[in-house]
Image (tube, grey):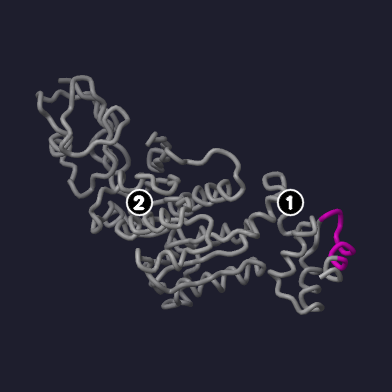
Amino acid sequence: MNITVKLFASFRTGRFEIESRDYPPGTSVADVADSLKLPRHELGIMMINSRHVKLDRLLAEGDTLALFPLLGGG
Amino acid sequence: MNAVAAFFKNHAVADLLAWQHQLEAAEHFGLSIAETEAIILDNGLLPARYQRNRQTISQAGQRELFRSQVAVIGCGGLGCYIVEELARLGVGRIVVIDPDTFEEHNLNRQLFSSPWQMGEIKVSAAVRRVADINPAVTVVAHQDALSRENGVELLSGSRVAVDALDSIGVRLQLADVCTLLEIPLVHGAIAGWFGQVTTRFPGEETLSNMYGSDKSAKGVESSLGNPSFTPALVASLEVAEVCKLLLGQGRSLRGRQLMIDLLSMDFCELVL
């Protein structure tokens, strides 16, 4: 299935800003993050089609997944 | 008090009262600068220091800011700039909470830090700085770490809380305290070239959606650090949110989150 993946902030470094990618049915948000070698502890806001989701959420054909790193500094 | 008001009316040029006369009145009538500021604003006059606020903030708005108390939690990269801007804006009472002292690695970005004052208590530096730049403003300093236990007492009387923390766990506790006190929380966080700002109203899930429930989580700032410009920018955005909330003007970031990427110079808004 075709998924549009959008990466933000430090996740773009050495990766991409937006890419259309193929994943098998049953792929979760965690699977996509792992395939991009995004450390789990760095994952902040995760959105599918502009709605908050958790790591175990399964993707569907045509979804847009947006991943933001966790920012905690002050 | 009538004699003081009359003194100010006599010395005002149009409705502007020069600092020199404010200081003279404080000395002559035995009042604090804060007391003179209240009398000036209550009599429809404006301390001249605020004349360039004027196209943005009305005289009544300036009075409203002076009568407001705002709590700034954290006095580091974000907090120093936030305190500076709130004081120059004319917010009358600023509560500043931070347990730490300045260290060498703060010098690249923390406005109140100086190589000549290493080891100074951060909230004491805030008191010193505000006394220097706007003596009409009262700073209530707490050298303490905010928690769910002490938060209600520390933030009591504040109309808005401003998040300038560097800990996700404490942020989640701050959000709970703001819900108990029924006050809005302006959230900001930074890491390297990146930052985010939003405004959370009591009871909203904004921070828990963002951070989950892992209170020990660390953001990417632990590897990216923080340069000078990111805290200055995010702090300014937070103060603009505070100003609007206090004045009841404009459209806040409630339900929206501004994501800032200064490396790509890309600002995007998430609808929460």
The foreground one among B213 and B217 is: B213
Placement of B72 over or under B125, stated as above or below = above
**In the image, residue A63 lies at what x, y percent?**
23, 24
**Could you say which quadrant of the image residue A52 lies in?**
top left
**In the image, residue B153 lies at what x, y percent?**
45, 68
In the image: residue B65, left or right of residue B254: right
Pair 2/1: label in front? 1
Q: Which residue is mark 1?
A: B59
**Could you say which quadrant of the image residue B24 lies in?**
bottom right
> How many other residues sit within 10 Å of disc 1, few (<14), some (14-19) or many (≥20)?
many
Name the residue: 53% across, 56% down: B159
Q: Chain of mark 2?
A: B
Give the Cα separation between the discs numbered 2 and 1: 39 Å
Placement of A58 over or under B131, stated as above or below = above
Per the rendered image, the range of residues in magenta is B6-15
In the image: residue A59, left or right of residue A46: left
Q: Which residue is mark 2?
A: B192
Residue B12 forms part of the magenta stretch = yes
Name the residue: 76% across, 79% down: B30
**Could you say which quadrant of the image residue A73 lies in?**
bottom left
Disc 1 is placed on an element classified as: helix
> How many other residues sit within 10 Å of disc 2, few (<14), some (14-19) or many (≥20)?
many
Disc 2 is placed on an element classified as: loop
